[in-house]
Amino acid sequence: MKRLIKSGLMFGNLVHVASPALVERYNRALKHLTGKETALTDFYIDISGYSPEVGHELGDPLYLNHAGVNRQFILLSAEQKNAPLLEAKFSTSWGILHKFIEENEAALFALTTRDAVAGELVNSVYDMSSPQRLFDIRRITVEADTTNGAIRQAQVLDEKVDRFLSEEDAWFDDVLIAEMINLAGETGDIVRNPVTLKHMSFEQQNFWTAHFGGTYLFQGMDHPALITAGDKGDLGELPIKYVFDVSERNRIAKFLEYNDLAEPIVKARGIDASAILRQKMDFILVDALAGEGVALSGRSRADMRRLARAHSDQLPDEFHTLGKLVRWAEDGGEWPRIASDDPAYFYTLRAAAHPDADLVNMLLSELAPKDIRQLFICHKELFYDRYRTWSEAKKEYVVDFLLREYQVDKLGARKALFGRDAPMETEKPDLDEMVARVGPWGPVRR
C-alpha cells in the first residue's frame, strides 16, 4: 500500500493539522465526543475529522464511528468539505457531510475561528447486530455544535432576547439582563451576527454499507431489492421480497432493467464509447498477463494490441466479447448478443441518469472488478482490498495508469465515463429500435 500512499492514490487530499491551536481544538472535540485525546502534534484528517494516524495511536480505526453507525465528526475548517471519507461504512456519509459543510460554510468559518465544531450523523439505529437493522435506517439527521456549546448558547440567548422584548416587565428583570450579558460574552452579538447551523436531515432509502460483507439496499425503487457481496443465506429473513448475492448475475441484470438503472455504454450519448471499451479491454489484458512476467507499465496502445495478439489464447472470454462490441461500434461489424450471464455483460453498462447513479456505478464496479479505473473511482474500499491481492506487475501498472490517465484530470475523466452531455450528432440509426426489441444485448436470461 506504500506505493498508493506515496502516489497520493490513498490518503490523498487530507487536511493537515499541524498548528498547536488546531491540535488543541481537535483534542477538545475528541474528548467531548469520545473521552479520548491524542498526543500527536501533527496529523491529517478527512472530511469527518477522522485521522488514520490518531486511529493507529488509539488502536481504534473506528474511534469516530463506534460500531460503524452514527458517524461522529470534528470540523476544524470548512476546507474539509473536499477531503475524502476514510473507513466509510455507508455510501451516503460523504455526501451528507459535504452538503452540511457547503450549506453552512459561512457559519462554520465564523465558529471554527475560535473552536472546533463536533457532531454526529444521527439515526435511530445504534448497532448493526443483525441485517434486519438496515431497514430501520430511514433518515439521517446532522447534529452539531462547538465544544463549548456556542450554538446552544446562542439559541438560549435568542430566547431570552425575545422574552426581554416581549414581556412587559422584562426591563426591570435584573437576573434576565445579567444572564443575557453573560451569554452575549460567549456568543457575541446574535442580532447583527446570528450564529446558527441549518437543521439538515436526509432520507436514507438506497445505500451501500460495508456491514454484512458489503450490502446494497435499494428500497426506493419500483422493484426493491437487496444485493449482497456476502452469502445471502447468512442474512436470515428480511422484510424485502428480493435478495440477491453478486453471483446471481441474471437476476441482478433483470433488477437493473426493471428499474431503468443502467444503460449500455454504446447507447450513452456524448461519450467515446469505443475508447472506453478499448480501455476496459486493456485492463482485462493486464489482469490476464500480470503473473506471466510481462512488463506492463508504460505501454502504449499499440504495445497493448501487440501483447493481445501474442497472448490471444490466454485472454478470457470477456476480452474477446468486448472486442466484438468495439468492432460493431467502429466498423459496423455483427451486433454481438451479450446475455446477462456473459462475463463481459456488466463491463458494457454504466448507470443511467438517475438520482442513485453513483450507487449503481458502485454496484457495477463490483460486478466488473477488472475495470480498475471504475473500481478506483466508484468503490475505493473494494479497490484497496483487491489491490492487496494483485501481483507486483499489476500494482505497478495500475498506479502508473491512474497517475497518468486519471489524477491529472479527475473531473474530465468522470464526465467522460459517467456524465450526461448533449446528444451526439450521429448515431447508429437502428440501435434504439434494436435495444427496445431485445434488451441491451439480447434477452436477459432468468
Image: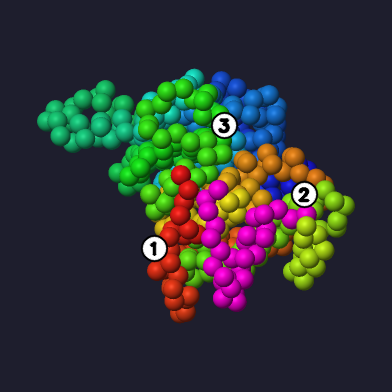
Q: Residue at x 39, y 63 (%)?
A: 436
Who is closer to the viewer here, 377 or 213? 213
Q: Is residue 319 magenta?
A: yes
Viewer-side residue, 149 vs 222: 222
The quadrant in which the N terminus is found is top right
Instruction: Please state which amino acid type lies under the numbered disc 3.
Output: Gly
**Residue 434: x %, y % from top left:** 43, 67
**Residue drawn where x is 40% and y is 69% of the image:** 433
Cα separation between marks 2 and 3: 26 Å
Q: Position of residue 280 (x, y in %)?
A: 65, 59
Q: Position of residue 312 (x, y in %)?
A: 77, 60
The first of marks 2 and 3 along the sequence is 3
Q: Which residue is mark 2?
A: 395
Crowd around label 2: few <14 · some 14–19 · many ≥20 (10 Å): some
From the image, state whether disc 2 or disc 1 is nearer to you.
1
From mark 3 to mark 1, how far is it between C-alphas? Answer: 34 Å
Q: Secondary structure at mark 3?
A: loop
Instruction: State the extent of the magenta-drawn residues as a range.
Output: 314-341
- Within 10 Å of disc 3 (Cα), the crowding (few <14, some 14-19, many 20+) is some
Q: Residue at x 60, y 35 (%)?
A: 87
Camera sees residue 61: yes
In the depicted structure, whether residue 288 falls above or below residue 152? below
Q: Disc 2 to disc 1, how far (Cα)?
A: 41 Å
Q: Is 358 left, or right, of 286 in this rendering? A: left
Q: Secondary structure at mark 1?
A: helix
Up-down relation of residue 410 to residue 202 (above or below): below
Residue at disc 2, secondary structure: helix
**253 within the magenta span:** no
- Whether residues under marks 2 and 1 lie with C-beta atoms below 8 angstroms apart, the answer is no
Q: Which mark is residue 436?
A: 1
- Which residue has dot 3 on it? 230
- Amino acid of disc 2: Lys
